[in-house]
Image: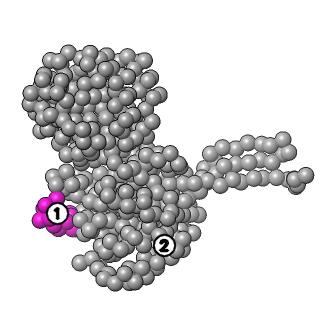
Amino acid sequence: MLERVEAKTTVADLMAEIGRKARVAAQPLAIASPDKKTAALNAMARAIERRQAEILAANREDVANGVTAGMSTAMLDRLTLDEKRIACIAESIRTIAALPDPIGTVIAEWDRPNGLHIERVRTPLGVIGVIYESRPNVTADAGALCLKSGNAVILRGGSDSAHSSRAIHAALIEGLEAAGLPRDAIQLVPTTDRAAVGEMLTGLDGNLDVIIPRGGKSLVARVQSEARVPVFAHLEGLCHLYIDGSADLAMARKIAVNAKMRRTGICGAAETLLIDRAIAPADFAALLGDLSAAGCEVRAEADVVSVYPAATPAREEDWTTEYLDAIISVRLVDGIGGALDHINRYSSHHTEAVVAEDPKVVERFFNEIDSAILLHNASTQFADGGEFGMGAEIGIATGKMHARGPVGVEQLTSFKYRVRGNGQTRP
């Protein structure tokens, strides 16, 4: 059983000690050589594979508890691990290991008229706190990304994935120790007491530099409201797919089903489908038929229902709902202008996609929508750091300060200036 800390003061003491250990571990981690970090990451991947049976057994316990608790199908999908997903976790860690080391990279450099040479150089953020729910793979992704970027990390997983996270964390510690790096560089909060989250939001006596929440809307809203340190996050993924009259309809049908149904419980799943009125009713009815055949419930405006009676009439709240389930809201719009009006009114600024062959439509879509990720002729399910070539991500950020979009290795760094002179003094 995981440790349960009953008294608030005990949780405060526990978290304060975790914060202090993380700050101490961050110092050698910030100057660790790329080779040492790579060795640790590759050792972690091997440990994940070697401990597969142990991880799967722990996950079965979490899934059984989830079923007993009445967890939704989509949430159970997020929680469940199998041999293929464990292999993907190990491969993701190896991909992160193979990425260029960002620390010490010169982002920009220039010379001043007085002879000073100035460099802007990447540095670690320091200590990162990650608060997440359901997805045990976040334990590995966050630990690996923070290590690669020279940061210590404090992981606070949800109670629903506690056993899985603990088993994965043991493999990460094995990798750290194999490379001679401090085991406190990746710490997993050992209690499921929610008071631990509150302590992290205070900043742990100045030992926490950034918090990244990854979970449901209520968790993220709490973190954004109460945190006393910077937060990288998105509140919800209200993602839109617009199919223009110029679209290749065979492509559009394929993309629409994938964007909604590949995995309905992820933040990049399409929640609203916008269809150009210029598309023939028989064609968009066929597209909606594809969605229904894949098991998706269609909620639509009256003009859509009149052509596709199998749809359920949509209500205003459907345009603002992140279903995270096999449900999609559908509306007809007057071309790209109507699509832009709808998206700019209802979007959560996460991910939007357009299927179109008209370059002017694509240009307007890219220029006039202010979301973190915009796609042309591709599924919204590509809103993922791994698919961007980042190895993995801790989450998607929709804010405009520092990190935006997938939060990978580079987004977990800051920078400092190195100024080289030869005796200059300021007049």
- The residue depicted at 64 percent of the width and 51 percent of the height is 121
Callouts 1 and 2 close, C-beta under 8 Å: no
Is residue 194 at least partly visible in the picture?
yes
> Mark 1 and mark 2: span between their CA atoms?
31 Å
Task: Indicate the position of residue 92 as horizontal and vertical percent values.
Answer: 36, 51
Is residue 98 at least partly visible in the picture?
no
Above or below, 2 against 54 in this view is below
Q: Which residues are magenta?
A: 55-71
Q: Which of label 1 and label 2 is nearer to you?
A: 2
The three-letter code of the residue at mark 1 reads: Gly
Numbered label tally: 2
Q: Secondary structure at mark 2?
A: loop
Q: Which mark is residue 272?
A: none
In magenta segment, residue 68: yes
Report the magenta stretch's main SS: helix
Above or below, 143 against 259 in this view is below
- The residue depicted at 36 percent of the width and 74 percent of the height is 195
Q: Is residue 125 left or right of residue 154?
A: right
Q: Would you name the residue on which mark 2 appears?
A: 204
Above or below, 41 against 24 in this view is above
Above or below, 404 against 93 in this view is above
- The residue depicted at 37 percent of the width and 22 percent of the height is 337
Label 1: few (<14), some (14–19) or many (≥20) C-alpha neighbours in 10 Å: many
Q: Would you name the residue on which mark 1 appears?
A: 66
The three-letter code of the residue at mark 2 reads: Leu
Instruction: Identify the image's colour scheme: rainbow, by chain, secondary structure or one colour.
Output: one colour
Q: Nearer the viewer, residue 210 or 300?
A: 300
Label 2: few (<14), some (14–19) or many (≥20) C-alpha neighbours in 10 Å: many
Residue lying at the far right in this picture: please name it. 427
Q: Quadrant of residue 68?
A: bottom left
